[in-house]
Amino acid sequence: MAKAKATVHGAISLVNAIANQKGATLGIDLTVEATIETSPGKGITIESDNKTLSSRLINKTIEKIISKKDLEQNKILVKLDSEIPTGYGLKSSSAISSAVALACAKIFKPKFTDQQILLAGVDASIESKVSITGAYDDACSCYYGGFNVTDNAKKRRIHFEKGPTNLIAVIFIPKNRKRGNLKNLKVLSTVFENAWELAKKANYWEAMIINGLATASILNSDPKIITSLIEKGAIAASVSGNGPAIAAIVKKDNESNIKKIFSPLEGRVIVSKVNNKKAEVHEV
């Protein structure tokens, strides 16, 4: 019998990685907690209040960490508690797979490195078709916090640093969950490449604005909203991930102006701090 609990945070996109497999993200402080409990027996049980959650992703992640032999001899209970709305581009699947991998590793693979734990979630994301690129960029910001600029194809962090704690993310979660055709993102691959090069040089906000205009025009969001947010004092704004959530980075005292832009739209707003805390795990 063993029990471990892992906490991992969410993230928002600065540069979408689908066109070129190169992305940039920033950690935010919405959390996912995964508790793994083992007992004699066999089989995996998942307890979560979230119905849209991919159990395939969780099962695959567990199989990446726990050997077949150990799975034959242990009943695995997974309890998930997430503050991140799923399916809006706020990296819930990366946070969930990282948290599950981290908690499993604590019990079964205590010598695993951060990279091994991260890759278990990334590979599981690709294999369970939750993510096209495996979302290495998302996984890094969920796991390490702060800014992460990554090459997803090579699974490498190219540039990373802590995020500014005097800024907050005001995130709009639209009622309509419709997403555009992701394949069309490749049409603007040179634009995304330029945005990524800016992020690599730590010009994160310029990169995010370019990404915002490009993704909004392709993914069924209105690019005008990005411009209005900047006009009202947002430092940067973009569709997060493949949407449909829209994130604006603002100074705390500007929160209400930004909320006004979202208020006529159908949906709700979440305000989140920037997160620089690395994922953590402990035995319970």
Image (cartoon, grey):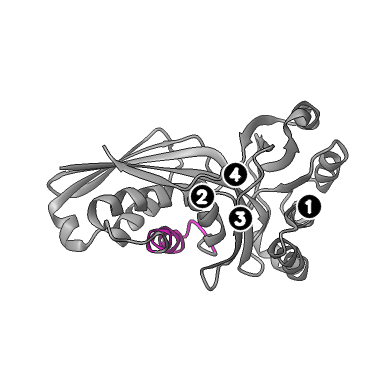
Q: Find the distance from the CA under tag 1 to the CA under tag 4.
A: 19 Å
Amino acid type, mark 3: Glu
The mark that comes first in sequence, 1 or 4, is 4
In this rendering, position of residue 277 left or right of residue 65: right
In this rendering, position of residue 234 left or right of residue 107: right
Q: Are marks 4 and 3 in contact (CB under 8 Å)?
A: no
Query: What SS does tag 3 mark?
Result: strand
Q: Which residue is mark 2?
A: 142
Amino acid type, mark 4: Tyr
Magenta residue span: 116-132
Q: Which residue is mark 3?
A: 161
Q: Position of residue 249 (x, y in %)?
A: 72, 41
Q: Position of residue 115 (x, y in %)?
A: 42, 63
Q: Which residue is mark 4?
A: 88
Residue at image position (59%, 44%) is 88
The mark that comes first in sequence, 2 or 1, is 2
Amino acid type, mark 2: Cys
Look at the image and tell me whether residue 149 can be seen: no
Query: What SS does tag 4 mark?
Result: loop
Q: Find the distance from the CA under tag 1 to the CA under tag 3.
A: 19 Å
Q: Which residue is mark 1?
A: 209
Amino acid type, mark 1: Ile
Of circles 1 and 3, which is in front?
3
